[in-house]
Image (cartoon, helix red, strand yellow):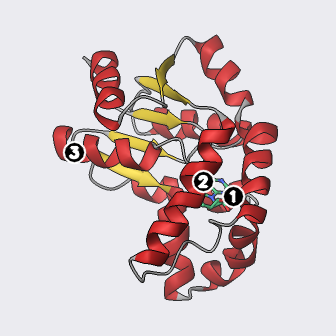
């Protein structure tokens, strides 16, 4: 089973993906995590994307499609959870093609619905928690980058909701419910 978790930054995609990894032996493919790893290890690609990510803008489709292509060729376990990918229509088209090449299907696109005020609160809270724990906060978890990340979401990613609805793949969960309630809603969709 291969699924997409779709929603703005702070909707809880990463949290739910981690639970699915544990409960269903699925593989989480987070392009954000892959890009942060490249940034930290200082690869050429990491250096190229660092400033773009810190600003809250999207990196090129070519880079993230390349990352996903590589992972789809690896082990599949209980299936893939796409977390933070696709984020643009060309990425969505590319994912469809890559899956088809692997003889795989997309089984559900789960939209995590939230509202903007709650999002901003969650993300600012995430930065605050990191600070208290003496850990470095994500470089893009600040108000300036957040505004840009939200704008990128509405301009470039939210059209995917209509795209997958038209394909008949879209399912919606209430991202404002508790973590366990959201998991339950997802479990009901996945069966
Ligand atoms: P995330 O952890 O998913 O919030 O991603 C953090 C940052 O990585 C984003 O703000 C973008 O700069 C970049 N990024 C992650 N996934 C993508 C993607 N699919 N397309 C373009 N940029 C991405």
Q: Which residue is drawn at 65% across and 68% down?
A: 140
Task: Give how far across and how far down residue 132 sits, in percent.
Answer: 43, 76
Q: Is residue 146 above or below residue 46?
A: above
Q: In which quarter of the image is ligand 1?
A: bottom right
SS at mark 1 in the image: helix
Q: Quadrant of residue 142?
A: bottom right
Dot 1 beta carbon under 8 Å from ligand 1: no
Q: Which residue is drawn at 46% across and 55% down?
A: 30
From the image, tell me which residue sits under label 2: 65
Marks 3 and 2, how far apart at CA: 21 Å
Residues 159 and 89: in front is 159
Label 1–label 2 contact, CB within 8 A: yes
SS at mark 3 in the image: loop
From the image, tell me which residue sits under label 3: 77
Label 3–label 2 contact, CB within 8 A: no
From the image, tell me which residue sits under label 1: 62
Marks 3 and 1, the one that precedes in the sequence: 1
Marks 3 and 1, how far apart at CA: 26 Å
- Please tell me the numbered disc located at residue 162: none
> Does residue 59 appear in this view?
no
Task: Give how far across and how far down residue 189 sits, in percent.
Answer: 34, 17
Residues 182 and 168: in front is 182
Task: Give how far across and how far down residue 62 sits, in percent.
Answer: 69, 58
> Does residue 18 appear in this view?
yes
Q: Residue at x 69, y 19 (%)?
A: 162
């Amino acid at each position: 089973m291969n699924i997409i978790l779709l929603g703005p930054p702070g909707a809880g995609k990463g949290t739910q993906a981690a639970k699915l990894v544990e409960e269903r032996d699925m593989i989480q493919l987070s392009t954000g995590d892959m890009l942060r790893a490249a940034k930290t290890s200082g690869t050429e690609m990491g250096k190229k994307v660092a400033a773009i990510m810190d600003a809250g803008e999207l990196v090129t489709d070519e880079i993230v499609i390349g990352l996903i292509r590589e992972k789809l060729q690896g082990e599949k376990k209980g299936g893939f959870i796409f977390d933070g990918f696709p984020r643009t229509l060309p990425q969505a088209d590319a994912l469809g093609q890559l899956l088809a090449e692997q003889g795989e299907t997309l089984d559900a696109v789960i939209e995590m619905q939230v509202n903007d005020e709650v999002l901003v609160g969650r993300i600012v809270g995430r930065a605050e928690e990191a600070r208290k724990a003496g850990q470095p906060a994500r470089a893009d978890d600040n108000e300036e980058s957040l505004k840009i990340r939200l704008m990128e979401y509405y301009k470039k990613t939210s059209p995917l909701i209509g795209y997958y609805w038209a394909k008949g793949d879209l399912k919606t969960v209430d991202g404002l419910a508790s973590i366990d309630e959201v998991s339950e809603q997802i479990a009901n969709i996945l069966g």
